[in-house]
Structure formats: C-alpha cells, structure tokens
Amino acid sequence: MKKNLVLGILDNYTFHQVKKFVLSLNRTGFKGDLCLFLGAKTTPRTIRLLRKQGVMIQFFKTVDSLPEGNLAGKIFELRKPINYFNYRHYLYYDFLERNKEQYEYVLLTDVRDVYFQRDPFDFELGDGLFCALEGPTKKLKDCSFNGPWMKYVYGQEGMAKVGDKIISCAGTTWGKVTDVMAYLVKMLEEIRKVPDAKKAIDQALHNYMIYTGMLDNLKFLNNDDGVILTLSYEKNYTIDKEDKVRVLNGRVVNVLHQFDRMPDLKKLTDRLYLKGHLQNKFNHKFNKLGLLIYKQMVKYKIRKSNT
C-alpha cells in the first residue's frame, strides 16, 4: 500500500523554530513520510534532532545551484537569481519523479508557521489538486502583498483577470502525486517566464494558474471546511477546553497555517510544544547563538578552501 507524503524546505532555521511543525505532525499519528529539504545553513544539531523525530532529509547547498542530477533542472533550466519560494519546486519535482511509485497523496507545505491537529490527509480525498483559500474578506487586488506580486509578474492585464478572486495560499497544496506533479510542471513553466525569479513570488504564479484555467480538476478548501485554516485574514475560530482549534461549525481543524500571526495561537502552541517561558526564551537564544557560530564556521571553511 502506498504511503502519503509531506514535503517542505527550510534553511537558516534551528530545530527550536520548526519544533511545533515536526512534533505536532508526529502527535497526530500520521503514518506517512515527512521529507524536508535542508540548506547548507542548517546546523548539525538541527539535522540530528530532525532525524531523531523520523524526518527524511534531502540536502541542497544553495539556491544558486541544483543538486547534481536534479531532474527538473534537465527540463526547466534553473533561473538565476532565484528565491527559496520558486527554487523549492525544482526540488519537489525531482523527489516526486524519483519516488512517485511509493506515494499516493502529497502535501506541499510551508514549515515554520504550520502546525497540525489531525492527520493532514484525514479528509475526503480523491483525484484533483486541493488548494487552500484564505479568508473571504480580502481579494487578490485588495491585499497589500498579493496585489503587487501579481502586478509585477502579470501586469495590470493579469490583475484584471484574477484580481476579484479570493486569495489562495501557495503554502499548503494537496493532491495525488500525479496531480501535484502536473501542478509542478506548470509552476516550473511559469517560473521560466517571470521577469525576475528572485523578485517574483510563486504565490502570484499559483493564483494566476488556478484562476485562469491552466490546471485541471481543482478543488478548493475553504477555512470553514476544517481541513486547513489559513489565518492571514481569518479570525473566525475558537479554542476549546482541550486546546483544539475549531472552525465555527465545530470541526477540529487538521492544519493551521500562519498561526504565529495570532497572539492566542502563538501562546497556545508555545504551551503545547515548547517548555516554560524562561526555558523557551533560553532555548531560543541558545539556538540563535548556535546558528550564528555555525554560519561563521561555514564562512571560515569557504575562505580557507579558496586560499
């Protein structure tokens, strides 16, 4: 039987900063695989603790180059310069192409600001690509982030096509491996066209693709469905006596995204997944210091190798 897969990327973060993501997923009883792509700035301690939690790890050196033999790079030449948001799709495509026979469904997800209350695949799945919609109060054209991103890539003409649509968040996207692969192909084709792959954000490409008919068999996940709660413009939720976040229809939410923007959810998750306030503060400082030292060591080794 094929497993389900969660895919993410991180660099320049410590285990302390992604602890909520990893621990909360494990506590749901999720039986699939969690694979994280780690950049060169990831400390050895973070790598060790992630492996201790059963995380599969793939490495990349820098966004300026792809790992040797990357399959996406052979089809879609890497755009330079490029940001992490766009770069990750090359890594995801390669991993899925090599491992597509092992997995049934996959979740492409942000890491630092995501945590889980239930198995992320615990809902009525089927064929198609599942895209998360943010709160209905903001349209793409009205958002101070999404609006400029869209105009930069697609101009006023592109904004006219999709500006009145509800924002879909590119940070959490589900589907069968075949559907996600089709999505990644379209995404990489769009990245190849953008004026600047460092200034352009995949969020704009994601919304343009889903609202202009570039993708087949789309299914939208609203905040009140209870599968994913994207919190940038959403405040309609409650926290019950068992510390579970529920949407207004009473359903316990599977996945929460951008939870750290809400003070009550930040406080809740600190209590659930981190130690007491003083210990938490110490861990934060300790990990930041460790990351700083590691960065200096990497810079020293690079300078020494070049002399």
Image (cartoon, rainbow, N blue to C red):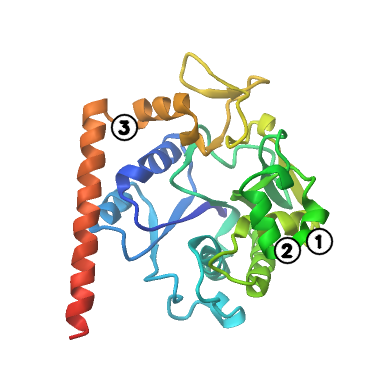
Does 176 sit left or right of 3 as displayed? right
Q: Secondary structure at mark 1?
A: helix
Q: Nearer the viewer, mark 1 or mark 3?
A: 1
Q: Nearer the viewer, residue 103 or 172?
A: 172
Q: Residue at x 31, y 50 (%)?
A: 14
Q: Nearer the viewer, mark 3 or mark 2?
A: 2
Does 185 sit left or right of 197 as displayed? right
Question: For mark 3, what is the residue?
Answer: 274
Q: Secondary structure at mark 3?
A: loop
Question: Which quadrant would residue 89 be assigned to in this image?
Answer: bottom right
Label 2 crowd bin: few (<14), some (14–19), many (20+), radius 10 Å = some
What amino acid is labelled 1 in the image? Glu
Q: Residue at x 73, y 52 (%)?
A: 127
Image vertical order of residue 210 relative to residue 113, above or below: below
Image vertical order of residue 298 relative to residue 266, above or below: below
Q: Residue at x 20, y 52 (%)?
A: 290
Q: Residue at x 42, y 36 (%)?
A: 24
Residue contact between numbered discs 2 and 1, judged by CB atoms under 8 Å: yes
Of the residues under marks 3 and 2, which one precedes in the sequence? 2
Image vertical order of residue 93 relative to residue 24, above or below: below
Label 3 crowd bin: few (<14), some (14–19), many (20+), radius 10 Å = some
Label 1 crowd bin: few (<14), some (14–19), many (20+), radius 10 Å = few
What amino acid is labelled 3 in the image? Leu
CA–CA distance in space, label 1 to label 3: 47 Å
Question: For mark 2, what is the residue?
Answer: 154
Question: For mark 1, what is the residue?
Answer: 157
- Tag count in the figure? 3
